[in-house]
Image (cartoon, rainbow, N blue to C red):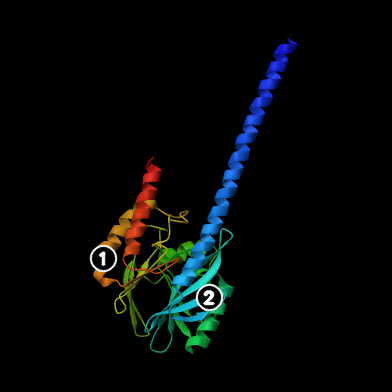
Amino acid sequence: MIRRMALVIIVSLVFIIGIFSICKMRLADANKEAAEKNQQMESELDDFKNKNIENILYTDDVFSIRKLTKDTYVYTAYGEFNGQKYPANGLILVGNSGLILIDTPWDDKKTRDLLAILKNTFHKNVSDAIVTHFHNDRVGGIKALQEEDISVHSTPLTDMLAVSDGYAHSLGDLSNNDFLTIDGRTLEIYYPGKGHTEDNITIYDKKDKLLFAGCFSKNNSDKTLGNIADADIPEWLKSINKLQEKYTEEQINWVIPGHGNLGGYDLLDHTKSLVEEQLKEHSK
């Protein structure tokens, strides 16, 4: 009886030690993976800064502004996502008398800071803004814009979703396939369908042959689709096909993704490949 109890105890101890060893190994693997991910994000951030240094009009620790064409500039605002410093792209369009902002920085404070920088840099005020979906890297500064009497254009769906997340109302005046002329700049608003979010829109400037795809498009260094908490992956594939049917490669010189390096039409192809990979993973 004593021998049997001793045997049971020994077997139990061996089992516990085995479980402990497995947990320890998995924890070590998780820590290693997290460290590698942090290192990769830092490397990508440095790579982003280096590749976008040409035609820099303004730069500090939070913002950079890069001239893209004669009257079109890309701004990048650095915020935090999952505890990491992360760049988000927007556009500054120079109109006849003022500026048009495409997407706000991450929050009201950063948006107020950007407005001051734009005033000092361009010696013009922002008259209008367009937000392309309801996440904070697009709508986080709506309140700050409204404090300056800046009209914030959006689709009704983006307005509804943003308000439900605690952000200020925007106009909700854009349709899913619309043309908007502001201060001499004519922009085509297009809703390709669900993707990164259910409300994501793109903005096309025919004169500059520029497509602001926002977070609907990934950049070429992205290995995954990133934040897909509000994504519809199967519909994203259909939506990319619709977008590529609407705009041919000949119509586009620049594609501006929501995050990371700018590119051309190939960014849409790359995003499509990432969506297809994600669908394959889900089907396993």
Task: Work out whether residue 209 or residue 38 is closer to the camera in this orientation and state it.
Answer: 38
Disc ID at residue 276: none
Q: Nearer the viewer, mark 2 or mark 1?
A: 2
Give the residue number, with chain letter if any, for mark 2.
63
One can see residue 106 in this view? no
**Amino acid under disc 1:** Lys
Does the image show residue 36? Answer: yes
* Residue 147: % across, % down: 55, 79
The quarter of the image holding the C terminus is top left
> For numbered disc 2, what is the local secondary structure?
strand
Q: Badge 2: how crowded within 10 Å, few (<14), some, or many (20+)?
A: many
Gap between marks 2 and 1 measured at Cα: 33 Å
Q: For the point 56% across and 70% down, which residue is it?
A: 107
Quadrant hosting residue 60: bottom right
Q: Earlier in the sequence, mark 2 or mark 1?
A: 2
Question: Which residue is denoted by mark 1 in the rendering?
Answer: 246
Residue beneath the point at 38% across and 52% down = 233
